[in-house]
Image (tube, grey):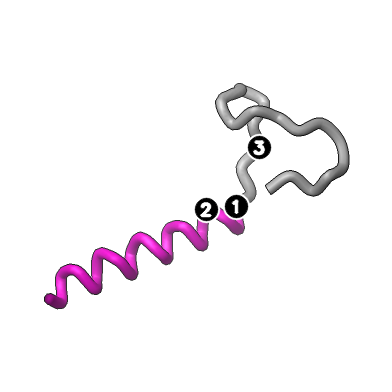
Amino acid sequence: VWSGDGLQLDLHQPTFDIDGRALAIGLRVMVNIIEQAAAH
């Protein structure tokens, strides 16, 4: 998410800097989806 300050960089650039917090949240979401699918 762009904070509104500084450059708004394209996601497909080598200068893209991922937010580690977003990565951790995405991982938890995907694991939860897999666990729910496996339970049914």
**Which element is circle 3 on?**
loop
Structural crowding at the residue carrying mark 1, measured as other residues with C-alpha within 10 Å and reported as few (<14), some (14–19) or many (≥20)? few
Kindly indicate whether the residue at mark 1 contacts the one at mark 3 (C-beta within 8 angstroms).
no
Residue at x 15%, y 77% (from the top left corner): 39
Residue at x 74%, y 44% (from the top left corner): 2
| Dot 1 amino acid type | Gly
The image quarter containing residue 37 is bottom left
* Position of residue 7 measured from the top left corner of the image (x, y, whole percent): 81, 31
Structural crowding at the residue carrying mark 2, measured as other residues with C-alpha within 10 Å and reported as few (<14), some (14–19) or many (≥20)? few
Q: Is residue 36 above or below residue 34?
A: below
Q: Which residue is mark 3?
A: 17
The image quarter containing residue 35 is bottom left
**Which element is circle 2 on?**
helix
Residue pushed farthest right?
5
| Dot 3 amino acid type | Asp
Q: Which mark is residue 20?
A: 1
